[in-house]
């Protein structure tokens, strides 16, 4: 520890360790964090951390500003504690102080005495209100090259590429919509990587962090610098915007930030698990603002895409699994790509551990839990197929515009079942019924609800269909 050119002696866990060995240990922890969280997070948050001491189960650290302290505390402190415990012996607590001050005396830290003055902390917080600091780490693996495309995501991919490649704003905002684990964050990071590479200033953050920063700014009466830091960016990306649904003050602020940036010709990219039209708890004017640009949906994966992703991940990791095992995974784990990756990683880890190639049988054992939860999920296609079988009509009738009662009614019943038994949004359901509008789906669902109240035959049909679908 060198401060003002003076060496500060530190006490360490066992009392004998030299200061440099203590520093070395913390450097090791930092290196592990760097590996785990990536270069950008490392530079913004982890590199600035200084180790102060480790006394009676408390590891004391210092960072330059209050802002960094809060962030490190909420995002990395737990991980630091467990890494330290794992490698150098158990500690109970990680205390983070703000430098410029003497290192926190453990006693003071333990008794909860604050060791920074608000005035200094505020000044520091204002200083780090630069674009680099409020953007969150990007995952280096989330690139366009590593993104496998297929019919379900190629439109979103093309739109993302266009934003990344074009200096000129083409559609604003780009709104990426898709269910959990289907690649929204991956595509956003890919845009950010490549826009940054071409010299544009990119701020990427979750809606949660947007709100966190905004609330902080309010608390410290510092909304000016909150607004100012956005002005310096070329591309603003906010991930998982559904997070601010129902949070009115944050929506209000986001609306103003959004408008200001659009007026200045800055590119905005948003992601959410639903389209603006379907999101609950969204203020109307924000909804219409968000719908102004291009809404690009990422649909559930197809079998071919899943197989492609598995092959690409194996190639990336330089690992091989038998083709029939990959096909088995692609067939069985259809929920989302994150689970698919999880399953693949589990099999690869197992193969390495036992030093034997994995078979479909072992895969079945190792993935029993995932397979079960995937089995339970009902798809729109399942429902359509079962309804068609039940009424002896053709699958094509689910998609066709024909309105004759013998096909229209079963189609409406299928819509009703999709609404009830799947988590798909109305527009998603509409698309699977020959590209019908979501209002048509609402109409169909209501119609069936009405009829069910008065038509016991229909009620019986519904019950036996539900049984067939669950089987
Ligand atoms: P979301 O943000 O939509 O919940 P993510 O972007 O976090 O989903 O994706 C979950 C995981 O699946 C990530 O590891 C991502 O790299 C991977 N993934 C999703 N779609 C693809 C794809 N088309 N090609 C390659 N990897 C993908
Ligand atoms: Mg995400």
Image (cartoon, helix red, strand yellow):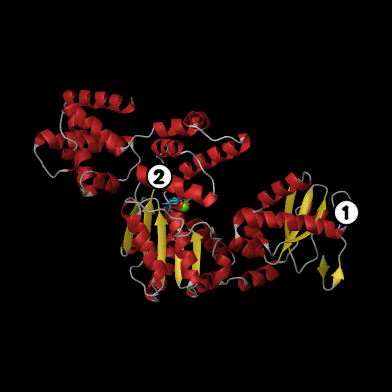
Q: Nearer the viewer, residue 148 or 219?
A: 148
Name the side, left or right, on which 3 lies relative to 178.
right
Does 377 appear above or below 138? above
Name the side, left or right, on which 437 lies relative to 10.
left
Could you say where residue 24 lies in the image, as x and y percent from the top left? 79, 58
Judged from this view, the residue extending furthest toward the right is 16
Does 416 appear above or below 18? above
Q: Mark 2 sits on what residue?
A: 306
Element type at marker 2?
A: helix
Q: Mark 1 sits on what residue?
A: 17
Q: How many marks?
A: 2
Q: Nearer the viewer, residue 16 or 191?
A: 191
Does 309 appear above or below 214? above
Residue 240 in which image quadrant:
bottom left
Element type at marker 1?
A: loop
Q: Nearer the viewer, residue 324 or 378?
A: 324
Could you say where residue 12 lies in the image, as x and y percent from the top left? 85, 53
Instruction: Name the residue rendered at 44%, 60% in the picture.
Output: 144
Instruction: Name the residue rendered at 45%, 45% in the picture.
Output: 310
Sequence-wise, which precedes: disc 2 or disc 1?
1
Looking at mark 1, is its residue's CB closer than 8 Å to ligand 1?
A: no
């Amino acid at each position: 520890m060198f401060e003002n050119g003076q060496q500060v002696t530190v006490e360490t866990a066992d009392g004998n360790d030299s200061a440099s060995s203590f520093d070395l240990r913390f450097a090791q922890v930092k290196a592990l964090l760097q590996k785990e969280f990536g270069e950008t997070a490392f530079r913004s948050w982890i590199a600035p951390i200084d180790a102060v001491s480790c006394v009676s189960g408390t590891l004391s650290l210092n960072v330059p500003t209050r802002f960094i302290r809060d962030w490190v505390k909420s995002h990395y402190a737990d991980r630091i504690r467990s890494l330290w415990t794992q490698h150098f012996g158990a500690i109970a607590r990680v205390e983070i102080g703000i430098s410029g001050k003497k290192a926190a005396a453990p006693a003071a830290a333990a008794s909860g005495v604050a060791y920074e003055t608000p005035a200094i902390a505020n000044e520091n917080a204002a200083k780090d209100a630069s674009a680099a600091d409020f953007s969150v780490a990007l995952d280096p693996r989330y690139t366009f090259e590593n993104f496998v495309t297929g019919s379900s995501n190629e439109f979103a991919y093309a739109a993302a590429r266009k934003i990344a490649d074009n200096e000129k704003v083409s559609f604003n905002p780009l709104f990426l919509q898709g269910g959990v684990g289907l690649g929204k964050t991956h595509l956003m990071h890919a845009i950010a990587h490549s826009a940054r590479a071409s010299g544009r200033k990119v701020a990427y953050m979750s809606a949660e962090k947007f709100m966190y920063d905004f609330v902080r700014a309010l608390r410290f009466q510092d909304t000016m610098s909150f607004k100012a830091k956005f002005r310096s960016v070329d591309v603003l990306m906010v991930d998982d915007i559904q997070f601010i649904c129902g949070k009115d003050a944050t929506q209000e602020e986001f609306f103003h930030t959004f408008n200001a940036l659009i007026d200045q010709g800055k590119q905005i990219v948003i992601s959410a698990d639903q389209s603006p039209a379907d999101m609950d708890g969204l203020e109307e004017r924000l909804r219409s603002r968000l719908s102004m640009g291009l809404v690009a949906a990422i649909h559930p994966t197809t079998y071919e895409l899943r197989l492609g992703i598995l092959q690409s991940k194996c190639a990336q990791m330089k690992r091989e699994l038998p083709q029939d095992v990959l096909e088995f995974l692609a067939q069985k784990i259809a929920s989302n790509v994150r689970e698919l990756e999880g399953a693949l990683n589990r099999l690869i880890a197992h193969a390495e551990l036992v030093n034997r190639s994995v078979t479909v049988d072992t895969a079945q054992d190792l993935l029993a839990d995932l397979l079960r939860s995937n089995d339970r999920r009902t798809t729109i296609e399942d429902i359509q197929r079962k309804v068609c079988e039940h009424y002896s009509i053709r699958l094509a009738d689910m998609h066709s515009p024909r309105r004759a009662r013998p096909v229209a009614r079963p189609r409406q019943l299928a819509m009703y079942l999709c609404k009830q038994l799947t988590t798909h949004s109305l527009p998603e359901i509409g698309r699977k019924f020959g590209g019908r509008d979501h209002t048509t789906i609402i109409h169909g669902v209501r119609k069936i609800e009405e009829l069910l109240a008065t038509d016991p035959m229909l009620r019986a049909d519904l019950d036996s269909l539900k049984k067939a679908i669950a089987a």
